[in-house]
Image: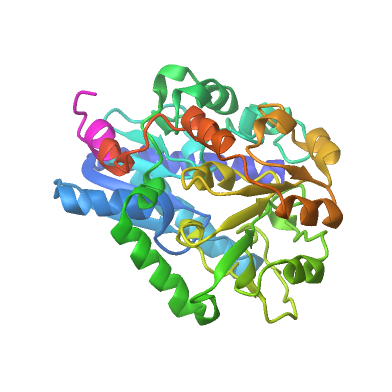
Amino acid sequence: MKTLERLILKYLLRIVYYVSYIVPVKKRIVFATYRKGTMNGNYQYIYSEIQESQIDYKCVFLFQKYQGGLSGTIKYFLHMMRATFYLATSEFFLIDDFYFPVYVVNNLRKGTEVVQVWHACGAFKKFGFSILDKNYGADNNYVKYIPIHSNYTHVLVSSDEVKKYYAEAFNMKEENIDPIGIPRTDIFFNEGLKKIAKEKVYSRYPKLRDKKLVLYAPTFRGTSQSDAKMSINFDISRLVNSLPEDYILGFKMHPFVKDTGNVDNDRVINLSDYEAINDILVMTDMLITDYSSIVFEYSLLERPMIFYADDLDTYIDERDFYYDYESFVPGPIVKNTDELLDVLEKDCDYEKIREFKNKFFDYTDGKASKRFVDRIILKKDK
């Protein structure tokens, strides 16, 4: 979308927003996202807690991915108009990423709160205002017309440790950032939920049953979500052949990657079309990743991790990190297949993983969803 088109859309949505003032603000919680079309992740756990608490709020779900083409563009424009109406007339408007309608208004209507639950734990690779004018980030000219990440009244984070980085990324004060935990991590502390998750994954992928799983889950490569690329730069056959017979290698590509391909090997499985990554993590025995924030959630399980970072220098130039990568990650760093196979034979440093977990999670009690409803929605005392 070009600058002129964005400006036209901005003022059209702003008109919709202020015209909507004729409707009073209602006791309503809106869940809005362009990232997925189904209920999972933070939204799933927050909504379940709302239902269990039986609070007097109506819930509305605005899940819409942009499909492209003329009809897709028209459909998405109408969706944004609808979202803008709900933004103006609801007490709570929840988003989990960049969300254009939130940024087009000068000030939120009194009685409305926008809660950014974000889609990642911790603070790993830079985002938002931290990467203005980098390959992946917005440019200064864009934010001059569209003030991204504005109008947030609350932002959920996993620990006090990362508040300063979210304040920087969202160009906001730390006082509106809430280190109350990430709702979707509640699954890691609930044996019943973990059992249900495993059975859901087994029903979709029966070959995983009675097997151990090594999961490769990298972040995407590319300058934006529209050109996200799949990246597998190690020798798959050599890795699989080095694993015990009861192990399977699984791939879980970033949701932005559209073409995840197929691998011709009986001991390899592509799990990329399964949206709820934490369902897969609870049954993962070892994680191989690179720069993905999945490392935070997986640390809660205190299981081995390997970091395949063959393009580390390039990634630092293009996007960079909030911490020094080599001293930050809680596992060995490898840059080719030989190094990867070598570390498979070595013992895991579990103490380093525990230290990492304790640094980036203030709560490890499985009650983040309850804290969200109690403190954000019901405004109960901390």
Q: Is residue 104 visible?
A: no
Whether residue 5 appears in magenta in the rendering, the answer is no
From this view, report whether residue 160 is shown above or below residue 263.
Answer: above
Left or right of 201, for residue 222: right
Q: Give the residue at x 41% y 72%.
A: 200
Left or right of 55, for residue 13: right
Q: How is the image coloured?
A: rainbow
Q: Position of residue 146 (x, y in %)?
A: 60, 34
Specify start and end residues of the magenta stretch as a single range: 373-382
Q: Give the residue at x 45% y 23%.
A: 160
Q: Position of residue 40 (x, y in %)?
A: 41, 58
Q: Which residue is nearer to you in this view: 110 or 113?
A: 113
Q: Which residue is nearer to you in this view: 106 or 133?
A: 133
Q: Which residue is nearer to you in this view: 186 or 42?
A: 186
Whether residue 379 appears in magenta in the rendering, the answer is yes
From this view, report whether residue 172 is shown above or below residue 225.
Answer: above
Q: Count the labels in the image.
A: 0
Left or right of 148, for residue 204: left
Q: Quadrant of the C terminus?
A: top left
Left or right of 366, for residue 174: right
Q: Which residue is nearer to you in this view: 218 or 130?
A: 218
Q: Give the residue at x 71% y 27%.
A: 324
Q: Is residue 56 visible?
A: yes
Q: Position of residue 82 (x, y in %)?
A: 40, 53
Q: Position of residue 175 (x, y in %)?
A: 41, 17
